[in-house]
């Protein structure tokens, strides 16, 4: 075996019969195979191989997949030519590795494939990485002409909507409206002068009917002016409206053609499972349409390439490299599970036929029957100490039905209200407020809506936070491709505001006090992790930072809550110190 010039320490290129064993092809195809396959050196021992394919939705990859990913990261860190721009703001990308072995050759070498999500450096194909799932030649035969058609329709729409004719029509309408306003103001002033004169003359007028005629003349003037204005404004508005309708019609045509082309693009993704079944992309998402970018993530590329090359998948890992996205939640060198939105329907199909671990289901673990403990209660409400690992409200089916709500209902069957007034994440511990009747529940939720309830959290963050205190204002929305993750979105996100204060610093970590002034899902977790927030994820955050080590937890705790009692009017404050 030879080590190619410039390769990483763990990369060897197989030659001759060894490559033929990998590819199942003639010796002349060996060079093609070597573009994609990396082989471990030294080879892993049998005990290091997973007994079953680990779930691609697990938060931590198998040790062997991690080893492959570390080799890839070393090459990325060294600066592959194709990775230029990954460190630019928002330029990072998800990369993946798939540990595999020649199918049917249990004694053959263990290696791995590499892939990236979407395009890299503006290209679908980059040497050393798995190609896209779709047939590039087939797409190239029709897509350039289709793209040009869309561009023509967009140019025609823009020419109508924003061209010289449209600009002149909008300017004419604005001028008409301004002139009408001036003429109406002038008429009102003249009529006001006339009314004053009539009032002064009315007392000594021998025949008041003459003054009435003057008043009716003013009314006629106003009616005539309004009619003339309406006709002029209708004509000017019609010109603008007609142009807008023409532009909208072109936009509709473009949208329809775009949908047609997207359906044709999706038809180009034909996937084959490990047991040899074939499905088109649209079938796997039916009855919904596939989301944008479905099939282009690293994981489906890797599994599709393994199927093409008759390689048996053993383990998979996905790692982010480069700058975090503008939406946040990704950090260079960190491992992430496959996304649920784009890959959720694809990966189970691609892996069908392999012995595969079930996807992890968070929540539903063993929680002592005495939990949650009561911290405060009266005839109308109760405040409990929610432990880490217990849902606030039931999830879907099975063990996920267990929750604070379910346990409170079992304890207090006489309660008539919805009980839980607000929620804490599964992984978050802390004080949780519940109502025993509907009226109390409504009154408490109204206090939350008016921001009259104060909540204080404490957390340990992975990183040293700059500054001592401040506020974070980053709008949030759900990541439609990877629920329940939340992302920062200035355009469509809901306002989210958090006050923070440093409590202490130790060993590269920071302990902070957090006060959410709004109540968005995962607000504190995103605000801490995002580069425009504290740029330090909460310790143990499997969604926005690094998963907790075995036996550890997310170090976020709701330490105190204060509210006005809806029946007594007294201010109630309940605290439970953080257990970390």
Image (cartoon, grey):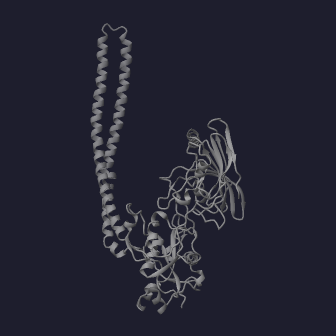
> Residue 65 placed where, x, y %?
56, 76
- 525 w.r.t. 178: above or below: below
Quadrant of the image for the C terminus? bottom right
32 or 557: nearer the eye? 557
> Residue 234 placed where, x, y %?
28, 38
> Residue 84 placed where, x, y %?
51, 72
250 or 181: nearer the eye? 250
Does residue 462 appear left or right of residue 52 in this picture?
A: right
164 or 212: nearer the eye? 212
Quarter holding residue 416? top right
**Which residue is drawn at the image coordinates 31% and 7% (left, top)?**
206
Can see residue 151?
Answer: no
260 or 338: nearer the eye? 338
**Which residue is drawn at the image coordinates 33% and 65% (left, top)?**
261
Does residue 451 appear left or right of residue 239 in this picture?
A: right
Can see residue 226?
Answer: yes
């Amino acid at each position: 075996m030879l080590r190619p010039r410039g390769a990483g320490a763990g990369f060897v290129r197989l030659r001759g019969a060894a490559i033929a064993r990998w590819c199942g092809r003639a010796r002349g195809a060996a060079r093609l195979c070597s573009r994609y396959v990396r082989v471990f050196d030294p080879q892993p021992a049998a005990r290091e191989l997973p007994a079953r394919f680990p779930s691609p939705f697990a938060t931590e990859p198998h040790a062997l997949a991690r080893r492959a990913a570390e080799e890839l990261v070393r090459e990325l860190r060294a600066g592959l030519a194709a990775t230029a721009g990954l460190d630019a703001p928002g330029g990072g990308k998800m990369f993946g590795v798939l540990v595999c072995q020649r199918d049917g050759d249990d004694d053959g070498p263990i290696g791995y494939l590499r892939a990236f999500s979407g395009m890299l450096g503006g290209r679908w194909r980059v040497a050393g990485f798995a190609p896209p799932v779709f047939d590039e030649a087939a797409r190239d035969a029709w897509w350039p002409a289709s793209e040009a058609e869309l561009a023509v329709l967009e140019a025609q729409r823009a020419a109508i909507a924003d061209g010289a004719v449209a600009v002149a029509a909008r300017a004419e309408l604005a001028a008409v409206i301004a002139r009408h306003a001036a003429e109406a103001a002038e008429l009102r002033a003249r009529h006001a002068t006339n009314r004053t004169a009539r009032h002064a003359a009315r007392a000594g007028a021998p025949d008041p009917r003459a003054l009435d005629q003057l008043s009716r003349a003013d009314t006629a003037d106003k009616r005539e002016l309004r009619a003339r204005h309406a006709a002029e404004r209708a004509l000017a508005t019609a010109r603008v409206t007609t142009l807008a309708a023409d532009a909208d019609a072109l936009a509709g045509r473009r949208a329809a053609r775009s949908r047609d082309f997207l359906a044709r693009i999706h038809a180009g993704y034909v996937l084959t499972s490990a047991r040899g079944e074939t499905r088109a992309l649209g079938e796997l998402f039916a009855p919904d349409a596939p989301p944008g970018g479905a099939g282009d993530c690293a994981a489906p590329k890797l599994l599709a390439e393994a199927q093409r090359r008759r390689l048996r998948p053993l383990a998979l890992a996905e790692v982010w490299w480069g700058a975090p996205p503008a939406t946040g939640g990704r950090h260079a060198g960190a491992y992430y599970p496959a996304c649920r939105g784009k890959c959720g329907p694809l990966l189970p199909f691609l892996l069908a036929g392999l012995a595969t671990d079930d996807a992890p289901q968070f929540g539903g673990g063993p929680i002592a029957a005495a939990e949650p403990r009561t911290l405060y209660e009266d005839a109308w409400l109760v405040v409990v100490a929610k432990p880490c690992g217990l849902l606030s409200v039931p999830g879907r089916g099975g063990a996920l039905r267990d929750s604070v709500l379910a346990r409170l209902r079992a304890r207090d069957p006489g309660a008539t209200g919805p009980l839980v007034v607000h929620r804490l994440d599964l992984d978050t511990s802390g004080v949780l407020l519940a109502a025993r009747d509907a009226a109390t529940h409504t009154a408490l939720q109204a206090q939350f809506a008016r921001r009259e309830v104060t909540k204080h959290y404490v957390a340990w963050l992975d990183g040293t936070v700059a500054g001592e205190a401040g506020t974070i204002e980053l709008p949030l929305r759900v990541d439609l491709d990877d629920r329940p993750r939340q992302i920062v979105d200035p355009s469509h996100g809901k306002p989210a505001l958090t006050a923070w204060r440093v409590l202490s610093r130790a060993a590269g970590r920071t302990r902070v006090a957090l006060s959410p002034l709004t109540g968005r899902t995962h607000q504190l977790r995103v605000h801490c992790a995002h580069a425009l927030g504290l740029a330090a994820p909460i310790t143990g955050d499997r969604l926005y930072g690094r998963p907790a080590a075995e036996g550890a937890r997310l170090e976020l705790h709701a330490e105190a809550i204060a509210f006005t009692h809806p029946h007594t009017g007294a201010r109630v404050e309940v605290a439970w110190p953080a257990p970390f």
